[in-house]
Amino acid sequence: MTKIVMPGEMVSERPLRMAYAYTDGQKTYSTVVAMLSPEGKLIPLEGPYDALPEDYVVGFVSDVRFAGYSIDIGTANPGSMSSRDSREKFSLGDMALAKIIAVDEVKNIDLADARKLLGGRIEKISPVKVPRLIGKKNSMITMIADATGCQIVVGRNGYVFISHKGDHKLAKEAVEMIEKEAHTSGLTDRVALYMKERKAARGGESAPASGMPPQGGMNAQPQAGAQSGQGGMPPATGQ
């Protein structure tokens, strides 16, 4: 039987390595409010973003200096990126996708390999819902991108870029639905049905997105259809 667990509550009588949990060497405890399935799977309902090296994040340029940039990624400290680690020049307020290359003991975050995200806006979801939004092998986010014609880039920090080209409103509604119902089963089918019904009600199909080319796969600038992983889990882009 699935049950709700609170931070500090035991989730296993064995020491297990699992996301959003810690061990004292004998047992395993949850660090967040979550659902614990009969199979022992921990499904977070809420929780902050814990920055890790190799994570891809989405954010805004919040400061421009001669030596580099500060990028707001929704953490206590903004990410820092040296000009030497960037192929592009950024301006204040630019949206960007970047890779975390280091996190020190006081949570200062170093970024690299940033690229601009143009022609859209950023939506915010709970970071613990990101794996559900992406889906197995990028299945969920690819489905949304294909149905709406939007370019979508998902940051591990919970910032989601959605292009204005395509049905931005429907893509946003689908993302919000997933965040709200991430803990439920059969979600993929419900999201697909919802988008189909919304498009039918509007009497038209979404136009394909264009303008932001997809990039490489795992641990590069990923695209929809690339394998999703644990921990660093690169964002997905559609179209």
Image: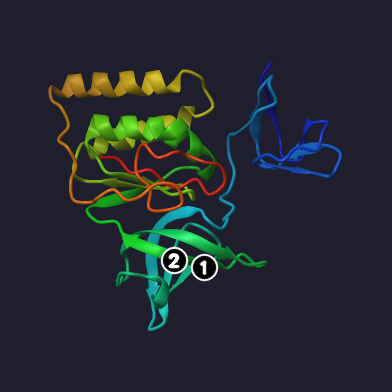
Against 92, residue 117 (above or below) is above
**Residue 191's mark?**
none
* Residue at left offset 29%, top offset 40%: 238
Q: Residue furthest top?
A: 1
Q: Amino acid at mark 1?
A: Asp
Relative image position of residue 200 (x, y in whole percent): 18, 19
Report the number of discs: 2
**Residue 112's mark?**
2
- Dot 2: few (<14), some (14–19), or many (≥20) neighbours within 10 Å? many
* Residue at left offset 52%, top offset 41%: 229
Relative image position of residue 58 (x, y in whole percent): 41, 55
Against 163, residue 112 (above or below) is below
Per the model, the C-alpha gap separating discs 1 and 2 is 7 Å
Q: Amino acid at mark 2?
A: Ala
Q: Quadrant of the N terminus?
A: top right
* Residue at left offset 29%, top offset 35%: 145
Inspect this view and state whether residue 125 appears.
Answer: yes
Q: Which residue is mark 1?
A: 110
* Residue at left offset 46%, top offset 59%: 99
Against 7, residue 95 (above or below) is below
Q: In this view of the protein, which residue sits in the foreground, 142 or 173?
A: 142
Q: Residue furthest bottom?
A: 66
Against 189, residue 238 (above or below) is below
